[in-house]
Image (cartoon, grey):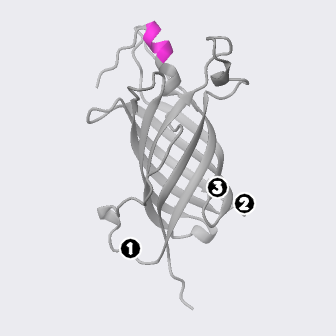
């Protein structure tokens, strides 16, 4: 997909681009098992998460206002995890032009860190599209594959999916609504998202 953004469109578009891990609301039940993960052995646990995050996008454009991909995208925040309590979460994602009719393609890593310092690593792949019913908002989807971890998550595997929407924080005074203004430097927007998936841990021999 070729994207050509004239300056006025670009300025309106960048808020959504900066929020590509935004306000996500997951499905009520865990996603089906991916074909590549059929036959996994171990203790299976359904896992849900609810997070608040801040994020940024290092977007780049050529002299004609066309996006120059990939764009690095980072997310930081805290997440309440079923059976684990409050944890830290971070994303490192690469944004590219969309595939299969989507506006943007997203591919990267999600890292969950517990209060004890154990880490759960996941590969995330998804897309983002404008929400036609809400100007300035975007819809988001991620397929999540848990790939491993440390401490209690050593040898972990699993899966889940993400569906949601997100909002960019605008420059103070840019419009009459101050409630979506960015009130300090260093981030591009804020988000709230949830996760629903399955965690598979190895069974330890006694």
**Which residue is under mark 1?**
40
**Outermost residue, bottom direction?**
206
Near-viewer residue (62 or 49): 49
**Which residue is under mark 3?**
80
Q: Quadrant of residue 170?
A: top right
Magenta-colored span: 7-12
**Which residue is under mark 2?**
115
Q: Is residue 155 above or below residue 192?
A: below
Residue 11 in the image, given as x and y percentages of width and height = 50, 13
Residue 11 belongs to magenta span: yes
The residue depicted at 35 percent of the width and 29 percent of the height is 103
The residue depicted at 48 percent of the width and 27 percent of the height is 137
Helix, strand or loop at mark 2 = loop
Eye-nearest disc, 3 or 1: 3
In primary-sequence order, the first of circles 3 and 2 is 3
- Gap in angstroms between the C-alphas marked 1 and 2: 28 Å
Q: Is residue 103 above or below residue 149?
A: above
In primary-sequence order, the first of circles 3 and 1 is 1
Main SS of the magenta segment? helix
Near-viewer residue (107 or 126): 126
In this rendering, position of residue 188 left or right of residue 94: right
Q: Are marks 3 and 2 in contact (CB under 8 Å)?
A: no
Badge count: 3
Could you classify mark 1 by the number of other residues whose Cα lies within 10 Å: few (under 14), some (14-19), or many (20 or more)? some
Tell me the quarter of the image containing the N terminus: top left
Eye-nearest disc, 3 or 2: 3
């Amino acid at each position: 997909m070729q994207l050509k953004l004239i300056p006025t469109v670009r300025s309106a578009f960048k808020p959504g681009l900066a929020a590509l891990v935004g306000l996500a609301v997951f499905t009520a039940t865990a996603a089906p098992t991916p074909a590549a993960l059929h036959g996994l052995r171990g203790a299976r646990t359904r896992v849900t998460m609810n997070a608040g995050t801040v994020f940024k996008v290092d977007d780049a454009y050529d002299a004609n206002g066309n996006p120059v991909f990939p764009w690095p995208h980072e997310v930081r925040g805290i997440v309440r995890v079923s059976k684990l309590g409050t944890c830290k979460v971070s994303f490192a994602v690469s944004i590219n032009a969309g595939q299969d009719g989507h506006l943007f393609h997203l591919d990267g890593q999600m890292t969950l860190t517990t209060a004890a310092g154990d880490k759960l690593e996941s590969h995330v792949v998804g897309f983002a599209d404008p929400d036609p019913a809400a100007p300035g908002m975007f819809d988001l989807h991620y397929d999540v594959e848990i790939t491993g971890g440390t401490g209690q998550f050593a040898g972990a595997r699993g899966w889940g999916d993400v569906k949601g929407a997100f909002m960019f924080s605008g420059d103070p005074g840019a419009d009459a609504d101050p409630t979506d203004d960015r009130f300090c430097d260093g981030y591009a927007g804020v988000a709230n998202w949830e996760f629903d998936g399955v965690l598979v841990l190895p069974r330890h021999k006694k």
